[in-house]
Amino acid sequence: MLEKENHIAQHQTGHNSGVIHSGIYYSPGSLKARLCTRGSALLIQYCQENGIQYESCGKVIVATRRSDLPRLDALYHRGLANGTTGLERLGPDGLAEVEPDVFGLAALYVPSTGIVDYRSVADSFADDVVRLGGSLRTNSPVSSIHLGEHEARVGISTGPTIRTRFVVTCGGLQADRLAAMTNGPRSPKIVPFRGSYYVLGGGAERLVKGLVYPVPDPALPFLGVHFTKQMSGEVWAGPNAMLAFAREGYRRRDVQARELIETLTYPGLISLASTHWRSGVREFGLEFSRRRYAAALRELVPDIEPRHLLRGPSGVRAQALAEDGRLLDDFWIDEARRAMHVRNAPSPAATSSLALALEIATRVRKALLAERRPLTRPPRKAAVT
């Protein structure tokens, strides 16, 4: 396992909201729907077996306008199709029993949604790799990948070249660049979107018991600003979603000129911006106005005020974007003879991680068996994260 940072989980895994998703949002039959539902169960079982704290706190998805009601109903039927367990429709009185301070015309209660600290999960995964005979090399940024007739060679900026029979890359914010090292397709390209959270303070944290989400806009892959309980007991509000000025730009002042120019001149982003510019303006306003952020949150919890919002963490979502401006909604995996590239793995990838790993392992095994060469010893595999 090769990791370019000095420790694992320094990017998306360590900067997300810590939700164990139920699988309700995703198109039936998609990789996300299948792997999230299975992955959630596997993750909870893994936490139980390895002493990792988690909480099945449940979630409400709330319709605050009449126009939300048909989409809420569609979500209910999608959840049933995806095997989401325990779904319950709530009216205003039922919502008040679950979340007394939340306003809504109707809601879906999703009891199978939970929370966990994914840094702890990732650390446990890393321990498993070593315990099972593998190795984890940090401070090992990949500089090249060469796919030969009988082996693959992975160049490391800080060490010797690794020779292996198969390479799996899952590089998040760098996923398309890793794929390009093996002449993978130029599209989809990773476009970074930064999301900022606030932490509720001033007593407002008592207004939210679990997870509170709006009905999402089906045209966008983002779920809208929402409330997320943390394992620490904090309640986070957010995130918004605006273009990051660097692939790993977690702060407003983080700017990488070359990366920004590359992103701004990408035809896919130009097409996306021309279609969804109003949403972009709204997200920009949320980023720089605590008052506007509080107003957006008051649609769900009317008693939220700007003084309740304390500046919190931020994360960067690695969103794959096609050249025609389509935001890829599903997981995306490219396959070559000696390499496999996970090109798009945003939320719910953390929830789906174990199921996604099984999917990748099955495909790798199939590719190795297709060589029809007898194996005298287990094949070596290099995974790039």
Image: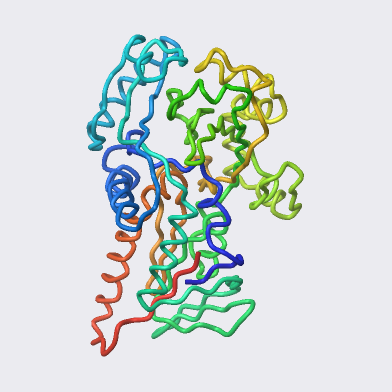
Picture coordinates of residue 144, whole percent (x, y): 57, 75
Question: What residue appears at the point 30 percent right and 72 percent down from the top-left corner?
Answer: 367
The type of colouring in the image is rainbow
Q: Is residue 308 above or below residue 345?
A: above
Left or right: 287, with 221 as reference point: right
Left or right: 26, with 346 as reference point: left
Question: What residue appears at the point 47 percent right and 71 percent down from the top-left corner?
Answer: 1
- Quadrant of residue 68 in the image? top left
Q: How many marks?
A: 0
Question: What residue appears at the point 56 percent right and 30 percent down from the top-left corner?
Answer: 237
Picture coordinates of residue 61, whole percent (x, y): 39, 24
Nearest to the observer: residue 110 or residue 364: 110
Q: Is residue 104 above or below residue 15?
A: above
Left or right: 123, with 113 as reference point: right
Q: List the single residue furthest toward the bottom.
A: 376
Q: Is residue 358 above or below residue 67?
A: below
Nearest to the observer: residue 47 or residue 284: 47
Left or right: 346, with 78 as reference point: right
Picture coordinates of residue 262, whole percent (x, y): 68, 52
Picture coordinates of residue 342, whole percent (x, y): 44, 58
Q: Is residue 175 above or below residue 322?
A: below
